Amino acid sequence: MNRGTRRGHRGPRTRGAVPAVVLGLSPTGLAVAGSLGRRGVPVLGVDAERTPAAASRHIAFHRAPPAGTDALLAALEALAARTGTRPVLLPTADEHAAFLDRHHERLAGAFRMLLAPGVARTFSSKNDFGALAARLGLPVPRAVAIGPGGPPPAVDDLRFPLVVKPDESHLWTADLLRAQGLPPAKAVPVADRDALGRLLRRLGPLGHRTIAQEMVMGPDENHVDYQVLVEPGGGVRAEFMGRKLRLSPPHFGLGTYVASCWEEDVAATGREVMARTGYRGVADVNFKRDSRDGSLWLLEVNPRFGLWTSLAVACGVDLPWWTYRSALGLPWEPPAARYAGGRHWMHVLWDARSMRAAIAEGRGGWGGWIREALGADAEAFVSRDDPLPALANAADVAARALRTRLAGRRGG
């Protein structure tokens, strides 16, 4: 762990509070840190890079090796030892959850974790989870795994169009996909068998197992995420859901403009998923409703906090705080009243790209988008009481744009 990193924690502290170690400083990590920091919890933010979130007044930043390397294990153990206690360890990305799962026995000696052993291993592989969900009778679209040898004959039993995904989400980085001339999306659509063959030839150099899955038809608004906290005893202690109004890239990317909502069948199915799989901890469960018949389909279970956790917090469903309390075995009671629907979260920079695509498709205009941005109840980086992450993010974007422009001039 780099001892030259910033130690000063500028948020109010609760005397004697056990520190929280937030692993990964994306917008998700910033949301988790903000929730805890505002309640006086000392937050140690760990990442391989100094991201814009590291500028937060709620975070004491610590640089560490990447999650894909076992060197991170020793760095985290050393950090825990320096705190003089067993901090609460909170993963914020798929690769972090997988890392915790791989080293659960050793990390459990240094940290308190709500994520049960084996959970991430079960859910990180889309092929393994799909097989499990099918055995348990959960509503997952039919899919087949595709290895280096190409698509198996079972592909012909699927109904086109399909979407092709990596077996593990974090294996498809934006840079890898762009290098193959593909958009940086979570999934790539294919209309027929020939299109599937062409795509697999382009994906071949990546060397990753992929999944071909029947496409759930419908607009972006048919995506609903169910965020939930399941305690060690199996009880559902908190739940929240949001509708993705825009995605980036459109139709097959991450939610960039989201509205809080409540749908009884989503909640019932989400609880059933948690019960049948024996899930414990916090999860972000992705659903999509098929426009052809209104059926609800389970797409994936992410063993971590969701990207727009700050929207749940803004609606009074403080998943990071309650997860922290549960990991410590402390009592708490969530509010009894149902949260408000129709509140919005936006990632302004990503959503601007989404809106550009929407306008090209004849949906909406910039005037409406500006009103949406100004009226959002939560934003990925923007916070009145914590302005530095937004400024750092804007500076990063400007620097990248300048480097791209200079590189274009040199290339010209």
Image: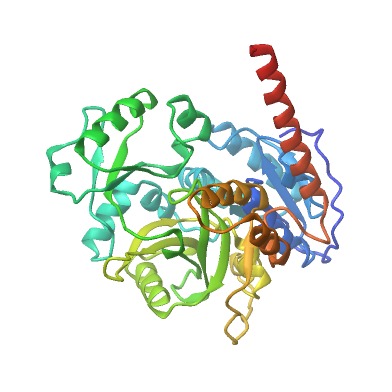
The reply to whether residue 171 is in sight is yes
Q: Residue furthest front?
A: 362
Tell me the colour scheme of the image: rainbow
User: Left or right of 46: which side holds 6?
Assistant: right
Could you tell me residue 252's position as x and y percent? 43, 49
| Above or below: residue 155 compared with residue 305 | above
Q: Nearer the viewer, residue 410 or 32?
A: 410
Residue 105 vs residue 135, the one in the foreground: 135
Q: Residue at x 75, y 45 (%)?
A: 54
Hey, which residue is sitting farthest bottom in the picture? 337
Identify the residue at horizontal 86%, vertical 63% (top origin).
Answer: 12
Tell me where residue 411 appears, x and y as whole percent. 64, 13
Residue 401: image location, x then y, percent? 70, 31
Instruction: Name the quadrant containing residue 316.
Output: bottom right
Which of these two is toward me, 383 or 289? 289
153 left or right, relative to 93: left
Left or right of 199 on screen, residue 7: right
What residue do we see at 46% from left, 73% from top?
233
Quadrant housing the N terminus: top right
How many marks the image carries: the answer is 0
Q: Position of residue 300 (x, y in %)?
A: 39, 56
Location of residue 317 by image quarter = bottom right
- Please identify the quadrant where the C terminus is shown: top right
Residue at x-position 52% and y-position 30%: 175
Residue 328 seen in the figure: no
Taking 52 as reference, is 377 above or below it? below
